[in-house]
Amino acid sequence: MLKRGFLYAGIALYVASFMLSLPYPNNMNTYASVTALTVPLKTTDGLYMEGIFSILCLIASIVCFTKCVTQLKSAAVIIPIVVYLVLPSVAIPMYQAYFAKGMYALSYEQEEAACQLTALNEQQLQLYCELPVQNYSDELVNVAVEFVGNDDVTEQLNAQAPYAIEVPAKLDGRIVIDELLVNDTEQVRYVQTATNFAIRFVENDKKRTM
Protein backbone atom coordinates (compact mmCIF):
# COMPACT_ATOMS: atom_id res chain seq x y z
CA MET A 1 0.00 0.00 0.00
CA LEU A 2 2.82 2.36 0.89
CA LYS A 3 4.60 1.60 -2.38
CA ARG A 4 1.44 2.36 -4.31
CA GLY A 5 1.27 5.76 -2.58
CA PHE A 6 4.86 6.50 -3.56
CA LEU A 7 4.07 5.45 -7.13
CA TYR A 8 1.06 7.78 -7.41
CA ALA A 9 2.99 10.63 -5.83
CA GLY A 10 5.92 10.01 -8.16
CA ILE A 11 3.70 10.05 -11.24
CA ALA A 12 1.98 13.27 -10.14
CA LEU A 13 5.29 15.01 -9.43
CA TYR A 14 6.79 13.74 -12.67
CA VAL A 15 3.88 15.04 -14.76
CA ALA A 16 4.08 18.42 -13.00
CA SER A 17 7.82 18.56 -13.62
CA PHE A 18 7.39 17.69 -17.28
CA MET A 19 4.68 20.31 -17.86
CA LEU A 20 6.73 23.03 -16.17
CA SER A 21 9.82 22.19 -18.23
CA LEU A 22 8.21 22.17 -21.69
CA PRO A 23 9.79 24.80 -23.99
CA TYR A 24 6.31 25.54 -25.37
CA PRO A 25 4.69 27.81 -26.29
CA ASN A 26 7.64 30.01 -25.30
CA ASN A 27 11.20 28.74 -25.32
CA MET A 28 12.69 30.30 -22.19
CA ASN A 29 16.10 28.83 -23.03
CA THR A 30 16.41 31.88 -25.28
CA TYR A 31 16.98 33.97 -22.14
CA ALA A 32 18.70 31.31 -20.00
CA SER A 33 22.04 31.91 -18.35
CA VAL A 34 21.96 28.79 -16.13
CA THR A 35 20.31 25.49 -17.11
CA ALA A 36 19.98 21.96 -15.77
CA LEU A 37 18.81 19.09 -17.99
CA THR A 38 18.00 21.75 -20.64
CA VAL A 39 15.66 23.50 -18.15
CA PRO A 40 16.42 27.19 -17.53
CA LEU A 41 17.05 27.97 -13.86
CA LYS A 42 18.20 31.54 -14.31
CA THR A 43 17.46 34.01 -17.10
CA THR A 44 18.49 37.55 -17.88
CA ASP A 45 15.64 38.65 -15.57
CA GLY A 46 16.86 36.59 -12.60
CA LEU A 47 15.84 33.24 -11.13
CA TYR A 48 13.32 31.33 -13.26
CA MET A 49 11.01 29.80 -10.67
CA GLU A 50 9.14 27.49 -13.06
CA GLY A 51 12.42 25.87 -14.07
CA ILE A 52 13.57 25.52 -10.45
CA PHE A 53 10.24 23.95 -9.40
CA SER A 54 10.43 21.62 -12.40
CA ILE A 55 13.82 20.25 -11.33
CA LEU A 56 12.70 19.97 -7.70
CA CYS A 57 9.59 18.04 -8.76
CA LEU A 58 11.73 15.77 -10.94
CA ILE A 59 14.08 15.00 -8.06
CA ALA A 60 11.14 14.34 -5.72
CA SER A 61 9.48 12.07 -8.29
CA ILE A 62 12.66 10.04 -8.72
CA VAL A 63 12.92 9.63 -4.93
CA CYS A 64 9.34 8.32 -4.94
CA PHE A 65 10.08 5.92 -7.80
CA THR A 66 13.11 4.50 -6.01
CA LYS A 67 10.89 3.85 -2.97
CA CYS A 68 8.63 1.70 -5.17
CA VAL A 69 11.30 -0.82 -6.19
CA THR A 70 13.59 -3.08 -4.25
CA GLN A 71 15.86 -3.95 -7.15
CA LEU A 72 17.25 -2.00 -10.11
CA LYS A 73 16.98 1.30 -8.29
CA SER A 74 19.37 2.78 -10.84
CA ALA A 75 16.74 2.18 -13.53
CA ALA A 76 14.24 4.17 -11.45
CA VAL A 77 16.67 7.06 -11.71
CA ILE A 78 17.96 6.76 -15.27
CA ILE A 79 14.70 5.99 -17.11
CA PRO A 80 12.75 9.04 -15.81
CA ILE A 81 15.66 11.34 -16.69
CA VAL A 82 15.99 9.94 -20.23
CA VAL A 83 12.24 10.20 -20.83
CA TYR A 84 12.30 13.73 -19.38
CA LEU A 85 14.93 14.75 -21.94
CA VAL A 86 13.49 12.95 -24.97
CA LEU A 87 9.71 13.25 -24.58
CA PRO A 88 9.38 17.01 -25.37
CA SER A 89 10.79 16.48 -28.87
CA VAL A 90 7.96 13.99 -29.48
CA ALA A 91 5.11 15.51 -27.47
CA ILE A 92 5.35 19.07 -28.80
CA PRO A 93 5.21 18.19 -32.55
CA MET A 94 2.33 15.78 -31.88
CA TYR A 95 0.38 18.50 -30.08
CA GLN A 96 1.13 20.98 -32.85
CA ALA A 97 0.07 18.54 -35.57
CA TYR A 98 -3.29 17.63 -34.01
CA PHE A 99 -4.39 20.53 -31.82
CA ALA A 100 -2.41 23.76 -32.32
CA LYS A 101 -3.61 26.64 -34.50
CA GLY A 102 -2.02 29.80 -35.85
CA MET A 103 1.46 30.66 -34.62
CA TYR A 104 1.24 27.88 -32.03
CA ALA A 105 1.45 25.33 -34.87
CA LEU A 106 4.82 26.72 -35.99
CA SER A 107 8.28 25.48 -35.09
CA TYR A 108 11.58 27.23 -35.79
CA GLU A 109 15.12 25.85 -36.20
CA GLN A 110 17.30 28.56 -34.70
CA GLU A 111 20.61 26.91 -35.62
CA GLU A 112 19.84 27.06 -39.35
CA ALA A 113 18.63 30.68 -39.51
CA ALA A 114 20.62 33.39 -41.26
CA CYS A 115 20.22 37.10 -41.99
CA GLN A 116 22.29 39.57 -43.95
CA LEU A 117 22.25 43.35 -43.80
CA THR A 118 23.76 45.08 -46.82
CA ALA A 119 24.41 48.82 -46.95
CA LEU A 120 23.19 49.95 -50.37
CA ASN A 121 24.13 53.57 -49.69
CA GLU A 122 24.25 56.00 -46.78
CA GLN A 123 20.47 56.00 -46.47
CA GLN A 124 19.36 52.45 -47.27
CA LEU A 125 19.94 48.90 -46.04
CA GLN A 126 18.83 45.65 -47.63
CA LEU A 127 17.66 43.05 -45.12
CA TYR A 128 17.57 39.46 -46.35
CA CYS A 129 16.73 36.60 -43.99
CA GLU A 130 16.03 32.91 -44.39
CA LEU A 131 14.11 31.46 -41.47
CA PRO A 132 13.63 27.66 -41.27
CA VAL A 133 10.02 27.25 -40.20
CA GLN A 134 7.68 24.28 -40.09
CA ASN A 135 3.89 24.64 -40.08
CA TYR A 136 2.29 21.54 -38.59
CA SER A 137 -1.27 22.68 -39.31
CA ASP A 138 -3.44 22.32 -42.40
CA GLU A 139 -3.99 26.07 -42.60
CA LEU A 140 -2.06 29.06 -43.90
CA VAL A 141 -0.61 31.01 -40.97
CA ASN A 142 -0.19 34.78 -41.14
CA VAL A 143 2.11 36.12 -38.45
CA ALA A 144 4.76 38.78 -37.95
CA VAL A 145 8.36 38.26 -36.86
CA GLU A 146 10.62 40.15 -34.46
CA PHE A 147 14.24 39.34 -33.63
CA VAL A 148 15.26 38.67 -30.03
CA GLY A 149 18.40 40.18 -28.55
CA ASN A 150 19.98 43.32 -27.13
CA ASP A 151 23.02 43.72 -29.38
CA ASP A 152 23.53 46.28 -32.14
CA VAL A 153 22.91 43.79 -34.96
CA THR A 154 19.55 42.75 -33.50
CA GLU A 155 18.62 46.41 -33.16
CA GLN A 156 19.34 46.87 -36.86
CA LEU A 157 17.37 43.73 -37.78
CA ASN A 158 14.40 45.11 -35.86
CA ALA A 159 14.60 48.53 -37.52
CA GLN A 160 11.17 48.09 -39.11
CA ALA A 161 9.95 45.05 -37.19
CA PRO A 162 7.65 43.23 -36.90
CA TYR A 163 7.87 41.81 -40.43
CA ALA A 164 4.73 40.15 -41.81
CA ILE A 165 5.16 36.64 -43.19
CA GLU A 166 2.91 33.91 -44.59
CA VAL A 167 3.59 30.29 -43.71
CA PRO A 168 1.77 27.88 -46.07
CA ALA A 169 0.00 24.83 -44.66
CA LYS A 170 2.30 21.89 -43.91
CA LEU A 171 5.37 23.89 -44.97
CA ASP A 172 8.71 22.48 -43.85
CA GLY A 173 11.18 24.88 -45.38
CA ARG A 174 12.46 28.44 -45.33
CA ILE A 175 10.58 31.70 -45.08
CA VAL A 176 12.31 34.68 -46.70
CA ILE A 177 12.25 38.23 -45.36
CA ASP A 178 13.47 40.70 -47.99
CA GLU A 179 13.04 44.30 -46.88
CA LEU A 180 14.49 47.71 -47.65
CA LEU A 181 15.40 49.52 -44.42
CA VAL A 182 16.44 53.05 -43.52
CA ASN A 183 20.12 53.25 -42.57
CA ASP A 184 19.76 55.75 -39.73
CA THR A 185 23.07 54.84 -38.06
CA GLU A 186 26.64 54.28 -39.18
CA GLN A 187 26.82 50.80 -37.67
CA VAL A 188 26.28 49.07 -41.02
CA ARG A 189 28.62 50.35 -43.71
CA TYR A 190 29.09 47.29 -45.88
CA VAL A 191 27.67 43.87 -44.97
CA GLN A 192 26.73 42.36 -41.63
CA THR A 193 25.52 38.82 -41.09
CA ALA A 194 23.68 37.15 -38.22
CA THR A 195 23.14 33.45 -37.59
CA ASN A 196 21.69 31.23 -34.88
CA PHE A 197 19.34 33.87 -33.46
CA ALA A 198 16.04 33.66 -31.62
CA ILE A 199 12.85 35.16 -33.00
CA ARG A 200 9.44 36.12 -31.68
CA PHE A 201 6.19 35.43 -33.51
CA VAL A 202 3.50 38.10 -33.20
CA GLU A 203 -0.15 37.28 -33.89
CA ASN A 204 -2.66 40.03 -33.07
CA ASP A 205 -1.85 41.00 -29.47
CA LYS A 206 -0.11 37.71 -28.63
CA LYS A 207 3.62 36.97 -28.78
CA ARG A 208 5.59 33.73 -28.76
CA THR A 209 9.36 33.51 -28.29
CA MET A 210 11.16 30.78 -30.20
Image (tube, rainbow, N blue to C red):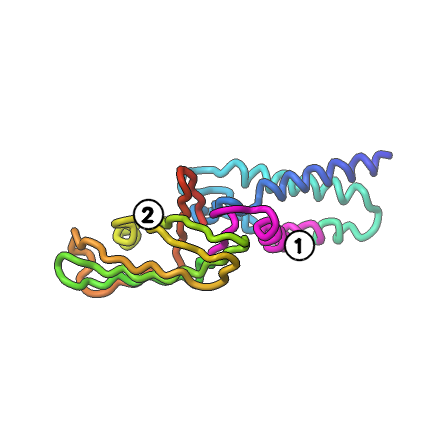
Where residue 184 appears, as percent x and y from the top left, is 16, 51
Identify whether 174 is placed above or below 161.
below
Residue at mark 1: 82
Identify whether 91 is placed above or below 119.
above
Q: Is residue 120 visible?
A: yes
Camera-nearest residue between 58 and 146 = 146
Where residue 147 appears, as percent x and y from the top left, is 35, 50
The quarter holding residue 116 reads: bottom left
**Residue 48 among magenta residues:** no
Extreme-left residue of the structure: 122
User: In the visual, does 46 lie left or right of 161?
Assistant: right
Numbered disc in front, either 2 or 1: 2
Identify whether 126 is placed above or below 104.
below
* Disc on res. 210: none
- Amino acid type indicated by mark 2: Pro
Q: Which residue is located at x 78 percent, y 37 percent? A: 6
**Residue 89 among magenta residues:** yes
Count of marks, rendered view: 2
Q: Earlier in the sequence, mark 2 or mark 1?
A: 1
Mark 2 residue element = loop
In three-dimensional space, the C-alpha distance between marks 2 and 1, rounded to whole angstroms, equals 38 Å
Q: Which residue is located at x 59 percent, y 46 percent? A: 99
Label 1 CA crowd tier, 10 Å (few <14, some 14–19, many 20+) = few
Residue at mark 2: 162
Where residue 209 appears, as percent x and y from the top left, is 44, 46
Mark 1 residue element = helix
Magenta segment boundaries in residue numbering:
79-108
